Amino acid sequence: MVFQDFLPSPALREYVSIFRLVHFTFGGADSIPFKPYPPRAEQYLAFYPRDTEAVHYPGRHEKIANTRSALVGQHDVVTDRYIGKDFLVFQVVFQAGALFRLTGVPAHELNNTYMDAEAIFGNSIKEVNARLTSTDRYEEMTVLIENFLLQQIRRSKMERHAIDGVAHQIVKTNSLTSLDALANTACLSSRQFERKFMERMGVTPKYFSRIARFAEAYRIKNSYPDKDWLSIALQCGYYDYQHLAKDYKQFTSQTPLAFHLLDLKAPERTFGERDRF
């Protein structure tokens, strides 16, 4: 069982925030619980060298399945993830704005999407997928994925924008200062700033900040399960518990407690792990 995150090589850190590696082997288990995957203020690329996962969106009958690599845009809904008995996912979590720089696809077109990455990256990622299935060594997987990313960076012609730094700061602090002040920092009007922010992050700055703050509350509860909800709310910048509960209802359709109880049944709990990402 592996459940960890680690930094990419220095050459990639302008584009990649973190690598996440999860590998669960369930053996003879008859039934594997699903993972309620909450919104996070992030976009990522996921590789599945072993069993893939099936993803179910609220309100849809069918699941998305059998994808060897997936490009995942900004989400503001919970997706239910169903995994196989030999499940390995290698996530490349991008720095703010990096996916737009690499693909040129406006981020808002990828909101709440889980799409086959081969549709964007073509044969270059198809080859990586094939080679990942032929190795059991995580170090070799890391090298394959890093070489692919470096190749994509060399092809990219888009520069980093001041807005990317603003979004990074929002994720880091879970707070948003005056929109006018941020726009001035980026030498843009407020309207231009909001439009460009949506192009690069998928949502408005204010909404992005709400998602980041909710995600931090989720992480704190999983890391410190005995901590009461009011303390978590205040630590994350909410006015009170009801303010926190409003965001939980918005992003999970559940109360904080109900979603936490649902998360307690997630696959990693079988191995005594908690989702602290």
Image (cartoon, rainbow, N blue to C red):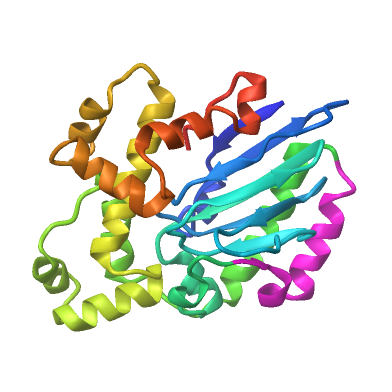
Q: Is residue 275 visible?
A: no
Q: Residue at x 61, y 40 (%)?
A: 35
Closest to the observer: 53 or 105? 53
Closest to the observer: 205 or 17? 205
Q: Residue at x 70, y 76 (%)?
A: 119
Q: Is residue 8 above or below residue 194?
A: above
Give the overall secondary structure of the magenta segment: helix
Q: Residue at x 70, y 45 (%)?
A: 82
Q: In the displayed structure, does residue 82 sit left or right of residue 255?
A: right
Residue 53 place in picture, x, y as percent: 73, 50
Q: Is residue 115 magenta?
A: yes
Q: Is residue 231 above or below residue 239?
A: above
Residue 116 place in picture, x, y as percent: 70, 68
The part of the chain drawn in magenta is 114-135
Q: Is residue 122 magenta?
A: yes
Residue 135 place in picture, x, y as percent: 86, 43
Q: Is residue 152 visible?
A: yes
Residue 203 place in picture, x, y as percent: 35, 69
